[in-house]
Image (cartoon, rainbow, N blue to C red):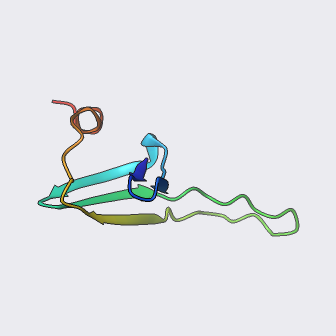
Amino acid sequence: MVLNTDLKEIMMDHALRTISYIADIGDLVVLMARRRFVSQEADEPPKISRTPKMICHVFESDEVRPNTKLNQILHPC
């Protein structure tokens, strides 16, 4: 979850299992996550294969710092 402390609102929220990439580049953080599949309507024919969709978030802040706990979970040594 990414919070905007100035506005006190949630900017982005993804389940940890959907996050596939995090980069900390200076004052930028890049986060990529798989998008959830939208359930089909009852009257639509079933799709044979689904291509996963990705969403990319880029955040810039002077307060960016690596989240050690999250990095250890996603990239264990």
| Residue nearest the observer in this picture, 11 or 34 | 11
The quadrant in which residue 61 appears is bottom left
The quadrant in which residue 38 appears is bottom right
Q: Residue furthest right?
A: 43
Q: Position of residue 34 (x, y in %)?
A: 46, 56
Q: Is residue 61 left or right of residue 6?
A: left
The quadrant in which residue 50 appears is bottom right
Q: Is residue 2 above or below residue 56?
A: above
Q: Residue furthest bottom?
A: 44
Q: Is residue 45 above or below residue 31?
A: below
Q: Position of residue 31 (x, y in %)?
A: 32, 57
Say which quadrant the C terminus sits in. Answer: top left
Q: Residue furthest left?
A: 26
Q: Is residue 31 left or right of residue 55?
A: left
- Residue at 21% of width from left, 35% of height from top? 68
| Residue nearest the observer in this picture, 71 or 63 | 63
Q: Is residue 14 visible?
A: yes
- Residue at 52% of width from left, 65% of height from top? 51
Q: Is residue 49 left or right of residue 11?
A: right
Q: Is residue 12 visible?
A: no
Q: Position of residue 57 (x, y in %)?
A: 36, 64
Q: Position of residue 32 (x, y in %)?
A: 36, 59
- Residue at 80% of width from left, 68% of height from top? 45
